[in-house]
Image: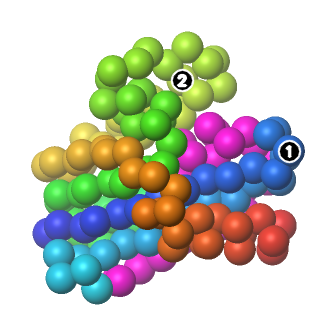
Amino acid sequence: MNKLIIYTDGGSRGNPGPAGIGAAFYNEKKEKVAEVSQFIGVATNNQAEYKAVIAALQKAAQLGATNLEFYLDSELVVKQLNREYRVKDKDLAPLFLQIYNLSLSFQRITYAHIYREQNKEADRLANEAMDRG
């Protein structure tokens, strides 16, 4: 599996509060091939968004993908990952670094912002994780 299209979402109830992450993985034919839904403990919304990308990168590596297209509804995280904004938050900096290090094992990664309505599957997975927490 060369290319994966990945939708990720992270959420927190309370910000910070109980948090969950979700990621939905699709092949080029738009067929769902994997998903991640995980409770991550107490985190902020932005920390959860970052941790969703980290979990998705780890899963994509397990699936053997080399080319990744990410879609997130967090404009801040997309702009930080695309290096349009600097990461000023001391709690996000190590997560950004972890994403950078994980990304080195892929040939190509893109990050694009989408509206929340276009990210329903990843949102559902993140909310299910929070419900389990």
Identify the image's colour scheme: rainbow, by chain, secondary structure or one colour: rainbow
Q: Which mark is residue 93?
A: 2
From the viewer's side, name the closer residue of 131 and 42: 131
Spot occupied by residue 41 in the image (x, y as percentages of width and height): 79, 53
Say what secondary structure mark 2 lies in. helix
Question: Within 10 Å of the Cα at label 1, are there few (<14), some (14-19), or many (20+) other Cα atoms?
Answer: few
From the viewer's side, name the closer residue of 64 and 77: 77
Q: Give the residue displayed 24% in from the left and 46% down from the top.
A: 110
Residue type marked 1: Gly
Q: Nearer the viewer, mark 2 or mark 1?
A: 1
* Quadrant where the N terminus is found in the figure: bottom left
Verify whether residue 50 appears in magenta: yes
Question: Within 10 Å of the Cα at label 2, are there few (<14), some (14-19), or many (20+) other Cα atoms?
Answer: some
Spot occupied by residue 37 in the image (x, y as percentages of width and height): 61, 71
Q: Is residue 102 above or below residue 89?
A: below
Say what secondary structure mark 1 lies in. loop
Question: What range is drawn magenta here?
Answer: 32-52
